[in-house]
Amino acid sequence: MATLEELRVQLDGIDNEIARLFEERMKVCGEVGEYKIQSGKKVLDRQRENNKLADVASKVHGEFNKKGIQELYTQLMSMSRKLQYQKLVEAGALGRLPFIAIESLEKEKARVVFQGVEGAYGQAAMFNYFGESCNGFHVHTFRDAMEAIEEGSADYAVLPIENSSAGAVNEMYDLLDEFENYIVAETIIPITHTLAGIPRTKLEEVKRVYSKAEALMQTTHFLDEHADWQRISVVNTAIAAAKVAEEQNKEQAAVCSAYAAKLQGLEILADNINDEKNNSTRFVIVTNQKVYLKDANKISISFELPHESGSLYRILSHFIYNDLNMTKIESRPIEGRNWEYRFFVDFEGNMEQPAVKNALRGLREETRNLNILGNY
C-alpha cells in the first residue's frame, strides 16, 4: 500500500495535468467566444450545456462521482461563459444601455414630490437632499408619487426604501418594477419617533395609537408596555398626527416625529420611543429620465430566475468573478406565479466600469426580465 506522501505526489501530478488542461480548455473557449462575436450567436446555449452534463455523468461510475463531475462541469461552463461575455464587451457588443451620464442634478429648479403631509419623514428627506427652499409638494401614496414623476408633474420623488431596524419597504420594490422610473440618488436620515397627543393628555387616557405600519414596528418595545392600546395603521406618520389633532380625542395618540407633532399643535407624551436608538431610513431620489451621476458608485437591478435548484447561486457568481461587492439582495413574489420570485440586488460600481459591463452582459443573458433600476 502506498504511503501518504506517495499518494500526495500522485495527486500533485494529477492536479498539474488538470491545471494544464484547464488553461487549454479556456483558450479554446475564448476562440469559441470570438466565433460567436463574428456569427452573432448567443453565449448561453442551455440545451448544449444540459447535453454536456449528461454526457460527462455517463463517463464516470457511482452516484457520488456523477453528481461531482456535473457540479465541476457546471462551474467550468460558467467560467467559460464569463470569459466569452468579457470578449463580447471588449468587442463593443454590450447591448443597449440607454443611460446618460450627467454632472449633477438640477436641484434649484426641480419640482419635488414626497409621500405624506407636512411633517412627514419624506419631507425631512426632501429638505436634506434638495434644501429647505426647494419647490416641493406632497401626495397621499407612494403610487401617487411614482405617477407624478412618470407623467411629468414632478421632476423627482423622494421615497423610503429601507429602514435600519424594520428592513425593506416592500411596496417600493414592487413600484420600482412596475413603473419606468429610475433611482438617481439616495439620502439617509435619522428617525426619532415620539408619542404625541392633544395637550394635557395623560398616558393612561390613551386607548388607540395611529401611525404608519413601519413606525409601529419600529416602536414595538414601547408599545408592548401598553398592551391594552389598539394599534392602527395609516398611510403616514404625519397623517397620523394630523388625524389626532383634527379629532381632538384624548383616547387617541400618534407615533410621529417631533416636527410633525409641533406642526399639528400636539403635545409629546413620550419622546425617543424607538426600539433601536440609531434608527435611520434610506430614501431614494427617483426620476423618469435614464440618467446617472458621473461619480455614481452603486447600481440597483432586478431580475427573475427559473424556479430550479442552483439558479440564484449561478447568477450571483457574476458578481464574484467580476470582483463586484454586492451590498443587498431582496426578493418579492411575482404576481400570478406561485412560489416564483423577483430579485432586487444592489452592488457597488459605475456603468462605465468594464467589470460592471461584463457582469450586466452575463446577467442579461442568463436571467429573465433584467431591469437596471439606477446607478447612483
Image: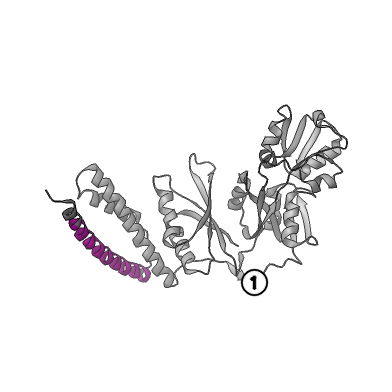
Q: What stretch is highlighted in magenta?
A: 9-38
Q: Which residue lies furthest to the top in this view?
A: 228
Q: Which of 179 and 162 is in front in this view?
A: 162
Q: Residue at (63%, 43%) from the top-left corner? A: 166
Check disc 1 and report its element: helix, strand or loop.
loop
Q: Residue at (78%, 48%) from the top-left corner? A: 117
- Where residue 2 sits: x, y (%)? 13, 51
- Where residue 359 sits: x, y (%)? 46, 62
Say if 331 sits above or below 133 in the image: above
Image quarter hosting the C terminus: bottom right
Q: Which of 258 and 70 is in front in this view?
A: 258
Q: Nearer the viewer, residue 52 or 262?
A: 262
Q: Name the residue under label 1.
A: 103
Q: Residue at (82%, 30%) from the top-left corner? A: 251
Q: Which of 358 and 272 is in front in this view?
A: 272
Q: Is the magenta stretch mostly helix, strand or loop?
A: helix
Can see residue 153? no
- Where residue 243 sits: x, y (%)? 81, 39
Please give left or right for residue 347 compared with residue 322 in the image.
right
Can see residue 245? yes
Q: How many numbered discs sit on the rendered protein?
A: 1
Which amino acid type corresponds to the residue marked 1 in the rendered image?
Glu
Whether residue 36 is in magenta: the answer is: yes
Q: Residue at (59%, 48%) from the top-left corner? A: 174
Please give left or right for residue 44 compared with residue 152 in the image.
left
Please give left or right for residue 101 compared with residue 200 in the image.
left
Kindly indicate the quadrant of the structure image that contains residue 205: top right
Please give left or right for residue 29 compared with residue 350 in the image.
left
- Where residue 204 sits: x, y (%)? 80, 28
Whether residue 63 is in magenta: the answer is: no
Say if 180 sits above or below 194 in the image: below
Q: Judge the density around disc 1: few (<14), some (14-19), many (≥20) Cα neighbours within 10 Å.
A: few
